[in-house]
Amino acid sequence: MLNELRRALPAGRVLTDPDILAAYAHDEALWAPHDLPLAVVRAHTAEEIQQTMQVCLRHRTPIVPRGAGTGLSGGANAVAGGIVLSTERMTAIREIDTGERLAVVEPGVVNETLRSACAEHGLWYPPDPASAPWSTIGGNVATNAGGLCCVKYGVTRDYVLGMEVVTGTGELVRLGRRTAKGVAGYDLTGLMVGSEGTLGVVTEVTVRLRGARAGERTVAGYFPSLSAAGDAVAAVAASGVVPSALELIDRHTLAEVDAWKNMGLSAEAEAVLLGRTDAPGEDEAQVLANCFAEAGATWAAVSSDADEAEALFAARRLAYPALERLGPVLTEDVCVPRAAVPEMLRRIENIGARHEVRIANVAHAGDGNLHPVLVVPADERERAQAAFEAILDEAISLGGTVTGEHGVGLLKRGGLTRELSPAVLAMHAAVKQALDPHGILNPGKVIASCVPSS
Amino acid sequence: MLNELRRALPAGRVLTDPDILAAYAHDEALWAPHDLPLAVVRAHTAEEIQQTMQVCLRHRTPIVPRGAGTGLSGGANAVAGGIVLSTERMTAIREIDTGERLAVVEPGVVNETLRSACAEHGLWYPPDPASAPWSTIGGNVATNAGGLCCVKYGVTRDYVLGMEVVTGTGELVRLGRRTAKGVAGYDLTGLMVGSEGTLGVVTEVTVRLRGARAGERTVAGYFPSLSAAGDAVAAVAASGVVPSALELIDRHTLAEVDAWKNMGLSAEAEAVLLGRTDAPGEDEAQVLANCFAEAGATWAAVSSDADEAEALFAARRLAYPALERLGPVLTEDVCVPRAAVPEMLRRIENIGARHEVRIANVAHAGDGNLHPVLVVPADERERAQAAFEAILDEAISLGGTVTGEHGVGLLKRGGLTRELSPAVLAMHAAVKQALDPHGILNPGKVIASCVPSS
């Protein structure tokens, strides 16, 4: 198989150096199982991906597509006897069309590279996952990545108009459109988005863009309890204002950021809310500040200082690395109805106490997407895994979902079977079988039962 | 089969009166083939739909799901030996949640009924097809309906969070979510939207809502040529302003509306553009007016009079009935990149001349979605059909699609095979086979090759 692959591809594409294999064996999810791949293929073109697929089809060799490897669910983890197919070298921005407000990019383009390129044309690609400086559009499409601004502007799927894909039968096809609207056939484009490489390998993406925004205003609030912060989130939802970001950081996280960077943030607050609004004028910012104050903030204000506002969001961005100083961390990604945010935060606190696991909270609170971060030294792994699953169950019981934006990968497969009914899981398996009839596309991800067949 | 159906359902659900069968035999698409159904089932509950599906599965009886029958592509046309399954009696709005900004509705709820109910809570359900006073949410979901405001606010799929569906294997399942975000498994909800009843029967829909808007401002422009109006559309796109509506009405349409209602609209203009903006302040309206003027409008102004503005949009809404006074009409639904609107309008004009078919144009110009209306007395049908197909081909050649918002149904099946590659059509067939393994769900719609099998 490897010789056939080498013959089919230009020199240097097929890598088998043990260090490289190890580097491409997994993404950033703690604990998700992985093996060493047989080889890593770093494709430069769609045709090379198609060639790779065709060789793998002949040999029934599993293919694990991979972007930058920044995933948090094990979706890009290598499979024994399979290859990892990296699109990181496909970095061309082929087109930015200012009139139609769309961009056509290769999958290896880094999210922030695209955002910067759009900005030069007065345009904006909204999805902004925390991994934006490193993660690629291909990976963002595979996981339907979200971010801070999706509370107002939606997630990756809302921006993908069309794509070029190598299918599970080795065809290179175009899905979707370049027009503003279109209902010609099934929404296979939307189906591919978030399918984590289990239904096809994306070789080009056409994304919708928005016009660049005027500046944002930042509103900060310090709260004496997580519930008060949760009440403020509910108050914002009820106010009618849709903030362009509404982030929550709890005391544990603030303390660690402070301990690391000495930013003087923690004060006495149990939680900080950071809101942003990009509406013209001061009105919306004032509404946010009032919601914070009425929910019991000890301090709430519209930031009049851009540097200060930037520092607050910098603290948000530093949350993960700060917590990682304490030991390995596992990031949760449950999403609940907005009104259930305070209750979910309480339940997470209880789970931490019950399982004796240190849990810090950061959250895209405005859309109910919570990222409890479990800090887990190696000897606490079992307790942490129990806490992890308990959090998924609580989210489901509050009408939420086990994954808001990170994907199912390997870590949430159990949660998925608890969230979806057997009939819906059977629909997933049927769709998977229809589009990947030989089961070689990222087998074992998303749906546990879908493994390669000959 | 009918006796079994009658036994399975409450009295009065199974209708076989010949007049009723005839009334439910087709939608509003001219020429689309149809037969008389064996029976019409008017279901009142999801369980009744499930019962119906299970009886039909046992007998391999085709089921044609139907909302209000206002479709324009033949998607709800009856099949010989099949039943028509109407959801028009399922009219409950089960929930409007102001905090989460969502509504849960039965499929038979009329679009405008939902919009009015939302308005009472200060909320807004944006999709506004021209059929809004009659068409149902179930039908809107089946066709992924658009409308005037989708140039700024998107189409039905952008608002469907989740649904309850009776599947092709007779299961009653929940798809999607109630949360703002979620990536738990494949986007089967989005796949169902726009699938025209070929993958399942929707029994409940959860839609996302927006906050009610402040008032809109209307900007009107009269143009000496279709190209000048097309240039104005391109100028608006380039300006960065996203209007909340941007509609085009051509001379033929204006003349017929005037001949019927004597509204004094036609004047000397070859085309009228009607723009709307809902941004606060006067700025955006003035930008639209300037774009109109600079593209060569003979008259362009922000309407200072709400009644006058309403009259202009009334003329837009009267376009179809006014043209129907001339004879049977066939409404096209191509969508092209915005920049191609002037060229597409020229090509439509040429097609009309070449095939000697009277074609009037109305268009959601702001998103490149054109609705050329072919006026075709019975003896001109062949020429009109040739013109109809020629328009599809021109749209494809300009990088557009054969259907922007009306769906494929029966009328666009040929166009679909020209727009999509054989490999993509094969993916459609595979997905259809996966989710409707016995081929009883609206057979023959969307993909011609998918017919019932035993």
Image (cartoon, coloured by chain):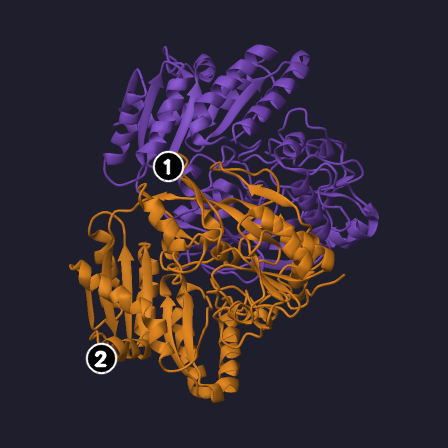
Chain colours: A orange, B purple
- Say whether residue A132 is visible: yes
Return the disc, 2 or 1, that comes first in the chain's sequence.
Answer: 1
Could you tell me which residue is drawn at 27 percent across and 71 percent down? A272
Q: Which of the 4 quarters of the picture holds residue B102?
A: bottom left
The chain ID associated with circle 2 is A
Q: Is residue A237 left or right of residue B250?
A: left
- Say whether residue B47 is visible: no
Q: Is residue B307 above or below residue A328?
A: above
Q: Secondary structure at mark 1?
A: loop
Determine which of the numbered discs, if any, sits on residue A268 in the image: 2
Report the front residue among A13 and B76.
A13
Q: Residue furthest left?
A: A304
Report the front residue among B398 and B47.
B398
Identify residue type, mark 2.
Answer: Glu
Whether tag 2 and tag 1 are in contact, CB under 8 A, the answer is no
Alpha-carbon neighbours of circle 2 within 10 Å: few (<14), some, or many (≥20)? few
Identify residue type, mark 1.
Answer: Thr
Q: Is residue A373 above or below residue A209?
A: below
Alpha-carbon neighbours of circle 1 within 10 Å: few (<14), some, or many (≥20)? some
The CA distance from mark 2 to mark 1 is 48 Å
Q: Is residue A318 left or right of residue A434?
A: left
Q: Residue furthest front?
A: A11
Could you tell me which residue is drawn at 37 percent across and 52 percent down? A113
Q: Position of residue B216 (x, y in %)?
A: 32, 36
Q: Is residue A390 above or below residue B379?
A: below
Nearer the observer, disc 2 or disc 1?
1
Q: Secondary structure at mark 2?
A: loop
The chain ID associated with circle 1 is A
Residue that label 1 marks: A98
